[in-house]
């Protein structure tokens, strides 16, 4: 881990994330891939080709707080943008509500009760009982305040538009998501996650591949990065904009509202140690200060590492957050689209 | 409680009562394990891996 003077405790937590993730996901990846194999007809190899305008550029619509705060979807809608739109599960409903039908939507997280929320959850009350993961984050204020009614509206909205959308679905998807998206009528294109080096003996990636023979794609640990990998390495889009990819929080967000606040309490003995787990970054376009947490920082680190292997140009048009570097320039979304 | 529940026989071997905190320690450890998992991200990622893998060498 380079840049900045991070505390030892912060470095220690970040260094454990890969192992925590492996322990958490490994068995689900195999179980879900086996369960999903019979349902799959098409993989990434079967994607139809894009028209010329859509081949030229793509906007990745991730679901960070800037998606709303920077009015990303309104800007896209008003610009009459002709390029490709790659959304993720968490931003799909917001796109549809803004009158934008994404060309592609990515989903990958194997969580058995949380991911279904993004597609409208028939078991919403049961699946959100005793789980405040979403409600304590600054992701969707409308949903937080009026969740049951919003969920019902989301089901209807998604059912109406699903058949027009290509869902780029990972073999790790949980069974309730698979059932829901099939019923809704999405066009499904399957893939496997790269979760280790497939060239190594006993590789889990290779083991998953043997189950279904789908192409494998790196994810950087999260669906937003997977959406960018998809646009860059599968669609081979030469010019890509990232939006909603904050990987951080506005300074006014209390750390108690961050995604892993309670989990991080396990790692520290004092308030001072806790605060050291949330380092600050100054966003270059505006001078605004944001802070990150170990998991978002890990995503940031992974993204920048994958970017080194990429072809073409990528711009961060999130207009806020912590994701920037010498080879990842920031510009406004309007600049990118004109 | 132990004063109320007395048997009317003597055991050959000494029986030691289960420590009350064993169960709570185990629950605590389960909770800790579950809590830590959320930090692990949405998917496994290992450094220095490629953007894609087609599996071609597996099929050869």
Image (cartoon, coloured by chain):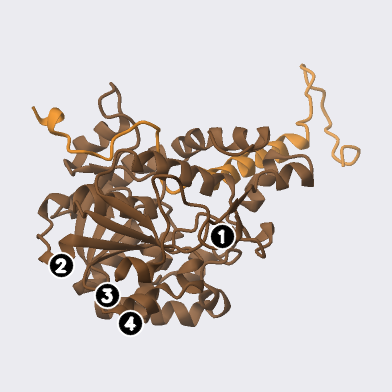
Chain colours: A brown, B orange
Q: Quadrant of the rendered structure where residue A308 is?
A: top left
| Residue at 44% in and 77% down | A151
For label 4, the SS is helix
Which chain does the residue under circle 1 lie in?
A
Q: Position of residue B15 (x, y in %)?
A: 78, 23
Whole-number angstrom distance, CA of label 1 to CA of label 2? 39 Å
Whole-number angstrom distance, CA of label 1 to CA of label 3? 27 Å
Q: Residues within 10 Å of mark 2 (few under 14, many from 20)?
A: few
Q: How many marks?
A: 4
Which badge, 2 or 3, comes first in the chain's sequence?
Answer: 2
Q: Nearer the viewer, residue B50 or A38?
A: B50
Which chain does the residue under circle 2 lie in?
A
Q: Which residue is mark 2?
A: A53
Q: Mark 1–mark 2 contact, CB under 8 Å?
A: no
Q: Nearer the viewer, residue A248 or A104?
A: A248
Q: Which residue is mark 1?
A: A133
| Residue at 48% in and 72% down | A70
| Residue at 53% in and 34% down | A2
For label 3, the SS is loop
Which chain does the residue under circle 3 lie in?
A
User: On residue A78, which mark appears?
Assistant: 4
Image quadrant where one finds the C terminus of chain A: bottom left
| Residue at 52% in and 77% down | A147
Q: Mark 4–mark 2 contact, CB under 8 Å?
A: no
């Amino acid at each position: 881990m380079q840049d900045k003077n991070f505390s030892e405790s912060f470095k220690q937590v970040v260094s454990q994330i890969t192992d925590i993730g492996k322990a958490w996901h490994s068995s689900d990846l195999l179980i879900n891939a086996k369960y999903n194999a019979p349902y799959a007809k098409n993989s990434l190899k079967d994607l139809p080709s894009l028209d010329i305008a859509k081949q030229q550029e793509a906007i990745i619509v991730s679901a960070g707080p800037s998606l709303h705060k920077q009015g990303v979807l309104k800007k896209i809608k008003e610009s009459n943008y002709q390029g490709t739109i790659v959304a993720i599960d968490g931003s799909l409903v917001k796109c549809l509500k803004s009158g934008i039908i994404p060309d592609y939507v990515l989903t990958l997280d194997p969580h058995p009760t949380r991911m279904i929320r993004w597609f409208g959850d028939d078991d919403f009350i049961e699946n959100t009982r005793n789980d405040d993961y979403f409600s304590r984050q600054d992701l969707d204020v409308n949903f937080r305040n009026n969740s049951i009614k919003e969920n019902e509206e989301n089901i209807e909205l998604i059912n109406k538009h699903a058949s027009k959308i290509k869902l780029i679905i990972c073999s790790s998807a949980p069974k309730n998501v698979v059932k829901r998206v099939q019923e809704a009528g999405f066009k499904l294109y399957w893939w496997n996650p790269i979760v280790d080096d497939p060239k190594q003996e006993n590789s889990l990636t290779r083991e998953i591949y043997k189950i279904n023979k789908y192409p494998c794609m790196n994810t950087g640990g999260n669906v937003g990065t997977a959406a960018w990998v998809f646009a860059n390495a599968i669609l081979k889009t030469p010019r890509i904009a990232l939006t909603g990819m904050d990987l951080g929080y506005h300074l006014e967000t209390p750390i108690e509202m961050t995604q892993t606040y309670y989990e991080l309490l396990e790692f520290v003995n004092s308030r001072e140690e806790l605060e050291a787990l949330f380092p600050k970054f100054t966003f270059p376009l505006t001078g605004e200060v944001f802070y990150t947490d170990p998991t978002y920082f890990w995503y940031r680190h992974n993204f920048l590492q994958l970017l080194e292997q990429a072809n073409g140009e990528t711009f961060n048009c999130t207009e806020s957050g912590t994701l920037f570097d010498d080879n990842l320039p920031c510009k406004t979304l309007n600049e990118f689209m004109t | 409680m132990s004063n109320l529940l007395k048997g009317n026989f003597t055991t050959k071997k000494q029986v030691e009562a289960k420590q009350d905190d064993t169960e709570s320690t185990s629950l605590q450890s389960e909770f800790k394990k579950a809590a830590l998992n959320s930090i692990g991200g949405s998917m496994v990622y290992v450094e220095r891996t490629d953007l894609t893998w087609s599996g071609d060498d597996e099929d050869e």
